[in-house]
Image (tube, rainbow, N blue to C red):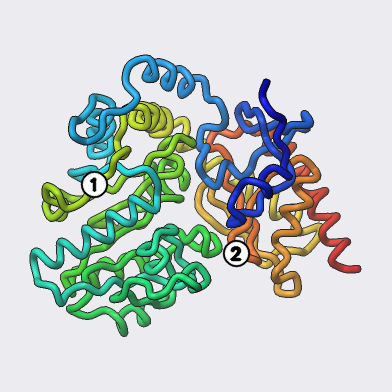
Amino acid sequence: MTEQVTRATFDEVMFPNYAPAAIIPVRGEGSRLWDQEGKEYIDFAGGIAVTALGHSHPVLVDTMREQAGKLWHLSNVMTNEPALRLAQKLTQKTFADRVFFANSGAEANEAAFKLARRYAFDHFGPEKNEIISFYQSFHGRTLFTVSVGGQAKYKEGFEPTPGGIKHCAYNDIEALKALISDKTCAVVMEPIQGEGGIIPADKAFAKAVRELCDEHKALLVFDEVQSGVGRTGTLYAYEQTGVTPDILTTAKALGNGFPVGAMIATEEVAKSLAFGTHGSTYGGNPMAAAIAEAVIDIVDTPEVLEGVNKRHQLFVDALTAINEKYDVFKDIRGMGLLVGAEVKDELAGHAKDFLANAAQEGLLVLVAGPNVIRFTPSLIVPEADIKEGFERFERAVAKTAADLKK
């Protein structure tokens, strides 16, 4: 007999590095979830921008079952058909010529940063090793990726961290000009900062970053772990910037919840990751690759991508209407279905209160830092769910606003 588990079980058996909500979802379908008590939730969180096609998508369920009856794992001592098909599609649909598969966004970024340094080493020597990133950026939780990330709190207590990394203000080209030099091997940026507060890059800024990289013979790395796979209304957000990176990382929505990540790059840059320089036991395993291929096939269609842009406007309109009544947000911003609502200065630090009250109303949302409420729903969330979800969110906003005025 299966032993009953509850939220209290977490505190008994799990490391305390997470503080999960009291609810334990047990079933999902589309953009709805049900917990152990049978309570239903509308999901505007999407597993933090992961379940881009919702829960239990029938095509993905069938794909997983079919592949599970064939091959689960081989390791990279041998290749496999699903991985090769997925790599073909990624190179056909993007700027890239070569693909490296990993298990997560952090691992894809780790590979990208290693590749950037190795490329500089091969072409210019060991002195060209500095990486520039941006404050408030987030690139993962490995020691290298938290060092490149621009949030000091994730490094605290884990020093000494890797050196040769500098940071400057996002969307501030003068700040980057002051840092970049011929010792710079790469500039790493998110085309829209996710964890940093849902802040899109200005097109002029992105263009100037590309030009500075070219001037100093540095690589441009785009972290699209959160913004990729249709999230912003194009398959990858770089398509909207007018800028092409040398290396791009992707994960999260790529597997719709099945762990998979990838680093893609131009052929010239990829050559530096020669035989034996990097590896991954599970990266590109048949199960992950088969599911990711199915995700790409569904997402990269006019119906889905145009639908993302339509739904973006529905989210912005709903948030604007709520704000006109309750006056709690100072900014509503984002791209596609990566949307942020920043609370007013007098409510600073209270974004989590909106999240908690939304859950009580049967709606799951996220935060991006202490001041931004983040929405990353399924790319195909039904319009009826959007309407009902914002009815629930309005009740949560009304309660939060009233509580904070007491």
The residue positioned 47% from the left and 61% from the top of the image is 193
**Residue 371 shows in the view:** yes
Compared with 104, 160 (above or below) is below
- The numbered disc on residue 279 is 1
Q: Viewer-proximal residue, 175 or 13?
A: 13
Q: Are there few (<14), some (14-19), or many (20+) residues within 10 Å of tag 1? A: some
Residue type highlighted by circle 2: Gly
The residue positioned 17% from the left and 62% from the top of the image is 118
Q: Is residue 53 left or right of residue 403?
A: left
Q: Is residue 52 left or right of residue 165?
A: right
Q: Is residue 197 left or right of residue 399?
A: left
The residue positioned 68% from the left and 67% from the top of the image is 330
**Residue 95 shows in the view:** no
CA–CA distance in space, label 1 to label 2: 33 Å
User: In the displayed image of the protein, which residue is found farthest to the bottom?
Assistant: 178
- The image position of residue 11, as x and y in percent, is 68, 49
Q: Viewer-proximal residue, 137 or 92?
A: 137
- The image position of residue 319, as x and y in percent, is 69, 52
Residue type highlighted by circle 1: Gly
Report the label total: 2
- The numbered disc on residue 369 is 2
Q: Quadrant of the C terminus?
A: bottom right
- The image position of residue 223, as x and y in percent, is 37, 56
